């Protein structure tokens, strides 16, 4: 047998032709809508973006054939991986070549730093062919360098000039698209002749608004995690002896956790936004979990599943205050960094926190307290994926149950297993939805570029309809912005979309959670992502999207 370099599924997926909206299939004509306003702080945003503020919404429709001059385009993958990134590049490549075969596409390597450090590769048909419909960002790599200094923008302009690049596509989350908007404004102000277009990426699902229905990657990642949760639920239901504490990725918002709960119907699901809204303490969260465990034990069910959003810790008001103080304290702190032992670091931090935060810090198990002081990401945020909240909760729940047992109020047996699902889903082979959506986003970007647009985010809407009916176009990025305090200063940023407690997905969950907590047979076992077969098995978007659209 010949050695295999690709799995049969990889080979089959390489041949998959992603679906496009009907408006992008032939010749495209651009329709401009009404002028736009930012979601808030209009005067401030307008003053900061005099050249890119207020631009109209754009949609594409079938139209007459048009000749476009040849363009050079550079593409950047920014931030965490999300399934479908390679298809944004394939769609962009195919769109550019269809609009003018002389168009060229370059990939900047390793994220935004590739633009600044002049690290690039020309993307040819052969290179792109290797990556069609695959997961990962390895075609050009990704990185988290922030583009925020004029010196970086000027270095970027230098390489663009050298390579004949007229436009840059930044595929990223809310922070990267905020940077894209600043870059678009800067280049326009300086007549650099470089357009900038953004694409909505993040498995976290928190880059969405009226015009961006979902970010890409959320669909596949949630389906992968839900499969694993379903498998664990089958195991729990078979062995009937473990409580599984499952933490799910999602830096801030709980969209992933909520979507996985809608897909798998666990016994408990914590939603950070609700914890914050109810001003809950960590002990309140523990108490809620304990109630369900005790109740199930009364019916002989000493097993279950609990979904925990990665960002939970930052939504508990007292923890939020502690983390914010730590962020300020540890930013560029050489004294702290020069300390060698964990104990020295602990003493140092305790001495400088406010009395309330110092108390919260002291009360935490040492391991978790240490995790809170680990390196920040380039945006200055604590790296929540490194904080093992699920272990913290297991420890606290076990203590509380032991007390109840001593008081004769709990007769069950508590044996817990911890899990963290994050990296398992970020580079999965994109679902049909993500493969089609990302290809369409990339294709849309090619048209926006050829039409000379800048400061827009590629947008594909009407996503619960068949792909042919999707609506492609562009949304001015300034439209999504507001002013927020970041590291002590007011900054223009894209508003992050958190879970809305009055939104349909949360309401559906809230209406059913009691039943899921107590019933014997409410688990759903979603099974693996399917690529070939009946449409209701292979092509349905997330429950979040469907409920939001209902
Ligand atoms: P983006 O917002 O850049 O898409 O990244 C999302 C994410 O996967 C979060 O869910 C997670 O907290 C974080 O990235 C992990 O970061 P890293 O890749 O640096 O470990």
Image (cartoon, helix red, strand yellow):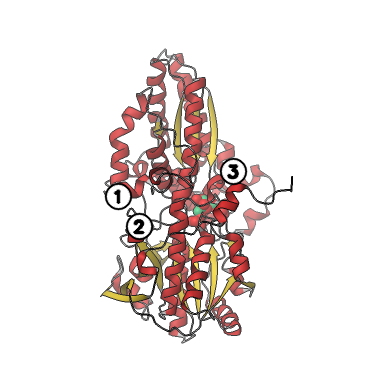
Q: Which residue is more in the foreground, 130 or 417?
A: 130
Task: Characterize the local packing of mark 1: few (<14), some (14-19) or many (20 or more) Cα atoms within 10 angstroms.
Answer: some
First in sequence: mark 3 vs mark 1: 3
Q: CA distance from mark 3 to mark 1?
A: 39 Å
Judge by depth and name the residue closer to the eye, 244 or 94. Answer: 94
- Could you tell me which residue is drawn at 32 percent across and 58 percent down? 462
Q: Horizontal placement of 273 versus 329: left or right?
A: left
Distance (Cα) linking label 2 and label 3: 38 Å
Do the residues under discs 2 and 3 have CB atoms within 8 angstroms?
A: no
Q: Residue 437 in the image: x percent, y percent?
A: 43, 59
Badge 2: residue crowd in 10 Å (few <14, some 14–19, many ≥20): many
Above or below 142: residue 62: below
- The percent coordinates of residue 173 (x first, y second) are 46, 60
Number of the label disc, if any, that sits on residue 548: 1
Look at the numbered discs 2 and 1 and tell me whether their residues touch, using CB distance below 8 Å: yes
Q: Which residue is mark 3?
A: 370
Q: Residue at x 53, y 41 (%)?
A: 421
Precedes in sequence: disc 2 or disc 3: 2
The residue positioned 54% from the left and 61% from the top of the image is 86
What SS does tag 2 mark?
Answer: loop
Q: Is residue 210 left or right of residue 352?
A: left
Q: Position of residue 206 (x, y in %)?
A: 40, 54
Residue 245 locus on image (x, y percent): 49, 32
Q: Earlier in the sequence, mark 2 or mark 1?
A: 2
On screen, residue 41 versus residue 162, left or right, reads left
């Amino acid at each position: 047998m010949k050695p295999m370099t690709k799995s049969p599924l990889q080979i089959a997926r390489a041949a998959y032709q992603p679906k496009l909206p009907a408006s992008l299939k032939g010749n495209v004509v651009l329709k401009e809508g009404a002028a736009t306003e930012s979601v808030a702080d209009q005067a401030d945003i307008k003053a900061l973006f005099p050249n890119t503020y207020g631009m109209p919404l754009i949609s594409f429709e079938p139209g007459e054939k048009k000749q476009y001059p040849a363009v050079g385009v550079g593409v950047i993958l920014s931030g965490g991986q999300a399934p479908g990134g390679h298809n944004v590049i394939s769609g962009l490549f195919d769109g550019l070549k269809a609009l003018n075969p002389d168009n060229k596409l370059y990939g900047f390597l390793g994220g935004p730093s590739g633009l600044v450090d002049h690290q690039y590769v020309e993307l040819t048909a052969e290179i792109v062919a290797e990556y069609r419909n695959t997961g990962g960002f390895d075609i050009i790599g990704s990185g988290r360098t922030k583009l925020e200094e004029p010196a970086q923008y000027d270095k970027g302009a230098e390489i663009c000039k050298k390579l004949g690049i007229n436009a840059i596509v930044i595929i990223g989350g809310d922070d990267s698209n905020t940077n894209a908007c600043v870059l678009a404004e800067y280049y326009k102000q300086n007549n650099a002749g470089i357009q900038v277009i953004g694409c909505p990426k993040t498995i976290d699902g928190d880059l969405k608004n009226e015009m961006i229905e979902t970010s890409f990657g959320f669909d596949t990642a949630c389906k992968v995690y839900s499969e694993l949760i379903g498998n664990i639920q089958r195991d729990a239901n078979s062995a009937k002896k473990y409580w599984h504490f499952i933490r799910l990725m999602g830096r801030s918002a709980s969209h992933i956790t909520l979507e996985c709960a809608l897909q798998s119907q666990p016994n408990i699901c914590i939603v950070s936004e609700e914890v914050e809204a109810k001003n809950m303490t960590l002990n309140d969260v523990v108490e809620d979990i304990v109630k369900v465990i005790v109740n199930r034990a009364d019916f002989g069910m000493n097993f279950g599943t609990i979904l925990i959003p990665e960002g939970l810790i930052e939504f508990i008001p007292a923890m939020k205050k502690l983390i914010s103080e730590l962020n300020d304290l540890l930013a560029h702190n050489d004294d702290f960094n020069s300390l060698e032992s964990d104990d020295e670091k602990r003493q140092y931090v305790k001495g400088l926190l406010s009395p309330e935060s110092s108390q919260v810090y002291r009360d935490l198990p040492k391991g978790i307290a240490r995790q809170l002081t680990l390196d920040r990401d380039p945006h200055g945020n604590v790296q929540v994926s490194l904080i093992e909240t699920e272990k913290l909760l297991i420890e606290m729940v076990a203590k509380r149950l032991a007390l109840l047992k001593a008081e004769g109020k709990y007769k069950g047996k508590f044996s817990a297993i911890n899990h963290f699902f994050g990296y398992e889903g970020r580079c999965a082979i994109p679902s049909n939805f993500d493969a089609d959506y990302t290809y369409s986003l990339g294709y849309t970007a090619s048209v926006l570029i050829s039409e000379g647009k800048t400061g827009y985010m590629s947008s594909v809407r009407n996503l619960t309809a068949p792909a042919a009916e999707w609506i492609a176009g562009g949304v001015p990025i300034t439209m999504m912005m507001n002013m927020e305090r970041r590291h002590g200063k007011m900054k223009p940023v894209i508003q992050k979309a958190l879970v809305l407690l009055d939104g349909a997905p949360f309401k559906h969950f809230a209406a059913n959670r009691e039943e899921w907590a107590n019933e014997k047979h409410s688990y759903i076992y979603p099974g693996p992502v399917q690529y070939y077969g009946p449409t209701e098995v292979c092509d349905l978007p997330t429950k979040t999207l469907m409920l939001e659209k209902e």
